[in-house]
Image: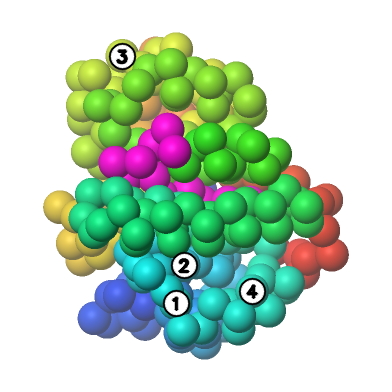
Amino acid sequence: MLVDVHCHIDAYPQVERELADSQAAGVRTVAVTTSLASYVRTRLLCRHHPDVHVALGLHPRRVGAGYAQWDEWKEVLGGAPLVGEAGLDFRFGQERDWAAQAEVLRTIAQACARDGRVLLLHSRYAEAEAWDIVMAAGVRWVVWHDYRPEAPKSLLYRTVEAGHMLAVGPQAAASPAMRARLRAIPREQVLTETNGPWGPLGTGSRAGALRGILAGLAEVWRCTPAEAEAQVERNFRRLLAAVRDGGPWPRA
């Protein structure tokens, strides 16, 4: 089984084709969303695909100085075991936007900690700030999306020591700096992601991209790609089991 813990299914121009292709290739997907509208749309698109788990997300760049559907979003959160993507992004915007993002993330992190939700964390150019909020809230299960090797090594090791997971994408798997850091991370805390259709992958084969990531992990772990695939599958199943045990959620 291939695992993609970060994919924007609703952004594909031919959604049904993408879903059919990934199902045929044995890809288990977490479909992240970026707003309440994105979540509702993705749920409808994936309603006949049990291999896709839809997460309720609110991309930080959607927050800005305010988000009109914030109250409605929080109401829907009550029935969502997977939250993402959500977090901070300080690459663009102004300080007032960043303050609003932090306030929203604080609320989301507290809800995840209270109810045993998994948080798929976006922390672009705000890694330390995002993790300070998440750690302070006591979120038990966090998947770090789009990790940049430029982020402090100490922060990566701190999050790993706390038991959180790192999602490795195509670019990260090909990075010598990233591979060096992966050697210091327990393989039980590694997952795979594509971020499709965004980034260099575009609308290319997610299955092919995931196999490429696994080949890179196999080199780091000194095992076969099949063994790397089995390890990531075990990690993903453990994450889903934690979600089921943490709250009154529907079974995957």
- Could you say where residue 109 lies in the image, as x and y percent from the top left? 62, 51
- Asked if residue 177 lies left or right of residue 127, the reply is left
Label 4 belongs to which residue? Answer: 74
Q: Nearer the viewer, mark 4 or mark 1?
A: 1
Q: Is residue 154 visible?
A: yes
Q: Nearer the viewer, mark 3 or mark 2?
A: 2
Rendered image coloring scheme: rainbow
> Separation of disc 4 and disc 3 at Cα?
39 Å
- Asked if residue 37 lies left or right of residue 62, the reply is right
- Could you say where residue 71 lies in the image, as x and y percent from the top left? 61, 80
- Could you say where residue 87 lies in the image, as x and y percent from the top left? 45, 53
> Separation of disc 2 and disc 1 at Cα?
9 Å
Question: Which mark is drawn over residue 58?
Answer: 2
Q: Are marks 2 and 1 in contact (CB under 8 Å)?
A: yes
Q: Are marks 4 and 3 in contact (CB under 8 Å)?
A: no
Whether 87 is drawn above or below 239: the answer is: below
> Separation of disc 3 and disc 2 at Cα?
32 Å
Q: Does the magenta run of residues contain 162?
A: no
Name the amino acid type tagged 3.
Ala
Name the amino acid type tagged 4.
Lys
Near-viewer residue (148 or 213): 148
Which quadrant would residue 217 be assigned to in this image?
top left
Q: Is residue 34 visible?
A: no
Q: Earlier in the sequence, mark 3 or mark 2?
A: 2
> What's drawn in magenta, residue-wise?
118-129
Name the amino acid type tagged 1.
Tyr
